Amino acid sequence: MSEVASVLYGREGIRRRIEELGRTITGDYEGRAPVLISVLLGGSVFLADLFREIRLPVAVDFMSISRYDDAAESLGRVRILKDLDQDIGGRDVIVVEDIVDTGLTLSYLASVLESRAPTSVEVCTLLDKSVRRIAPLAIRYRGFDCPDVFVVGYGLDFKERYRNVPDILAIDDIAALTADPDALLGFLADDRRAPNGRGGLAADG
Ligand code: IMP
Ligand code: MG
């Protein structure tokens, strides 16, 4: 359909992986009640699916941050636009992220959270672009080890578009997408929904 992008992780593969992550977290935190913290906006789609696979009395909270992209000396520092509503002191915290790239954002965020004296802080990211990592970061739970390509869909955006694409797409031609931001609308079309609920078959493996 499009040479601009291709399905990297199909919706059914994503669903299965999240089921596994939910099962693992449920086992690891048995008898405890972790707080899942999602970083808006991208992480919210993953959080919504993940926390319904966790069979524990979890709490959920949201944070909104903005990166200082311009200044090199502010590497990874973020401004908190919306802070947590809950006190995480003495709680087990799991930060739920859509993607960890350089890791700068998350390592800064982790240090902010650590300063509030939680019992523990772990990270669960759907995608780990591990080859791009700059900040050393212990990621306890990862969905997929993601190749070094720009991805959209399942919460991830290109200029605030395509967060609602059910599959995760790799952008193969970023120049073409920049020239025509509508180039991926076909991936939102209904005819990609197979009757048995599978989609993105090629990448589902
Ligand atoms: P970093 O780990 O500090 O470099 O930044 C991670 C953040 O950058 C993620 O939470 C995303 O918001 C964004 N990001 C990184 N890679 C991608 C991508 O391939 N597509 C969309 N957003 C991305
Ligand atoms: Mg993010």
Image: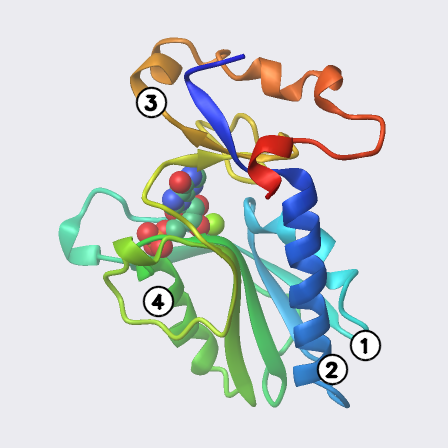
Q: Amino acid at mark 1?
A: Pro
User: Is the CB–ligand 1 distance for label 4 below 8 Å?
Assistant: no
- Circle 2 Cα neighbour tier, 10 Å, few/some/many (<14 / 14–19 / ≥20): some
Q: Amino acid at mark 2?
A: Ala
Q: List x then y, in percent, for residue 18.
A: 67, 57
Q: Give the answer, above or below, for where 24 lies relative to 45.
A: below
Q: Closer to the camera, 153 or 8?
A: 8
Q: List x then y, in percent, for residue 158.
A: 45, 29
Could you tell me which residue is drawn at 64 percent across and 46 percent down?
Answer: 13
Instruction: Indicate the quadrant where residue 78 lies.
Output: bottom left
Q: Secondary structure at mark 1?
A: loop
CB-based contact (under 8 Å), mark 4 and mark 2: no
What distance separates the C-alpha of mark 3 from that of mark 2? Answer: 42 Å
CB-based contact (under 8 Å), mark 3 and mark 1: no
For residue 33, the mark is 2
Please report whichever mark, 3 or 2, sits nearer to the chain's N-terminal start: 2
- Circle 1 Cα neighbour tier, 10 Å, few/some/many (<14 / 14–19 / ≥20): few
Please report whichever mark, 4 or 1, sits nearer to the chain's N-terminal start: 1
Could you tell me which residue is drawn at 41 percent across and 9 percent down?
Answer: 180
Q: Residue furthest left?
A: 73
Q: Secondary structure at mark 4?
A: helix
Please report whichever mark, 4 or 2, sits nearer to the chain's N-terminal start: 2
CB-based contact (under 8 Å), mark 4 and mark 1: no
What distance separates the C-alpha of mark 3 from that of mark 1? Answer: 42 Å
Residue 82 visible? The answer is no
Q: List x then y, in percent, for residue 86.
A: 66, 72
CB-based contact (under 8 Å), mark 4 and mark 3: no
Q: Amino acid at mark 4?
A: Tyr
Q: List x then y, in percent, for residue 41.
A: 56, 45
Instruction: List the residue tagged with mark 4.
Output: 108
Instruction: List the residue tagged with mark 3.
Output: 174
